[in-house]
Amino acid sequence: MRPVETGQPDTLYERAEHAARFIRSRVPAAEDARVALVLGSGLGAFADALEDAHPLAYAEIPGFARPTVEGHAGRLVLGKVEGVGVAAMQGRFHFYEGYTLEEVTFPVRALGLLGAGSLVLTNAAGGLNNSFEQGALVVISDHLNLLGANPLLGTNDPRFGPRFPDMSEVYDREYQDIAINEAHALGVELRRGIYAALAGPSYETPAEIRMLRLLGADAVGMSTVPEAIVARHMGIRVLGISCITNMAAGVSDKPINHEEVIETGERVHETFAELLRRVIPKLS
């Protein structure tokens, strides 16, 4: 007996296609979005300044979850930067919010099927490297996935990518060079660093920070890595930039709180925004 046709998307690929079609139906210009952008804590204001901006609440988009963290507005903004089509996420979903990694990375799947060939991932991170200062920007050169899970677990759909995708260069070397060169043109130092992702939501202990430093990490956070893995699975080129919003436990004896993270992100957002405005046209 054949299964009853419900007309509802069933597989992850079909659900992501459904979301992409919905976005196109609401914003026809979404077809031109060649660069996808995920804006982390305190950095969402960049999307408000996009040319020809068309916002969509996540609540409207099939398959998108709802962010629950302060500093994550929960909107997808379609627009342009220097004439380049951009799909910017004002806020992301996190593993620690109780979402599965499939839910966390679903927007990347949908935006990839929408046509984005480049993904810029931004985040607020804790600094482990003593040469970083609060408010510093760091381009991610590699990562440590310490979440205890991988977004590609389960059945693989070859329409997305191979069963065993190569992760030799998750963060595109050419994109890193572009970001560093544009930062220097702005008079801003942009260093390369390795980002470690932990599940959270508790901040790391001093002992955990010592461990991460021994492993070679320069910054630590609770996001970015799942989206980067899924993007590379789909063949999307990735640029990752961290804003060091606080020094990690044990690096500084100052207590860590989320309000400080938001405040630092807002303080550097103009510099960050100008860097993105310069970088994005060179990624398309």
Image (cartoon, rainbow, N blue to C red):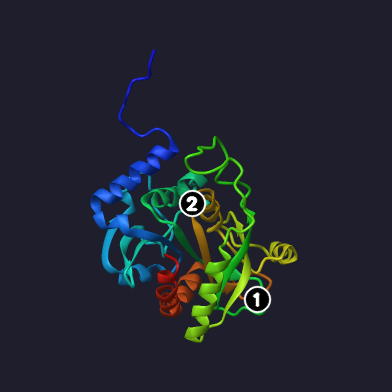
* Residue lying at 61% horizontally and 52% vertically, measured from the top left: 147
**Rounded to the nearest whole Å, what is the CA distance between mark 1 and mark 2?**
27 Å
> Which residue: 28% across, 60% down?
55
Quadrant of the image containing the N terminus: top left
Residue 106 in the image: above or below residue 131: above
Q: Residue at x 32, y 67 (%)?
A: 80
**Amino acid at circle 1:** Ser
Question: Residue 156: which quarter of the image?
Answer: top right
Residue 205 in the image: x percent, y percent? 67, 63
Q: Label 1: which residue?
A: 252
Within 10 Å of disc 2 (Cα), the crowding (few <14, some 14-19, many 20+) is: some
Residue 269 is left or right of residue 101, and the answer is left
Q: Residues within 10 Å of mark 1 (few under 14, many from 20)?
A: some
Q: Residue furthest top?
A: 1
The percent position of residue 254, horizontal first and vertical second, equals: 61, 76
Of mark 1 and mark 2, the one earlier in the sequence is 2
Q: Is residue 135 visible?
A: no
**Element marked by disc 2:** helix
Determine the residue positioned at 53% across, 65% down: 240
Callout 1: SS = loop
In the rendered view, does 99 fall on the left or right side of 202?
left
Instruction: Answer left or right for 65 relative to 60.
Output: right
Quarter-wise, where is residue 164 in the image?
top right
Q: Amino acid at mark 2?
A: Glu
Residue 97's disc number? 2
Count of picture labels = 2
129 with respect to 124 (left or right) = right
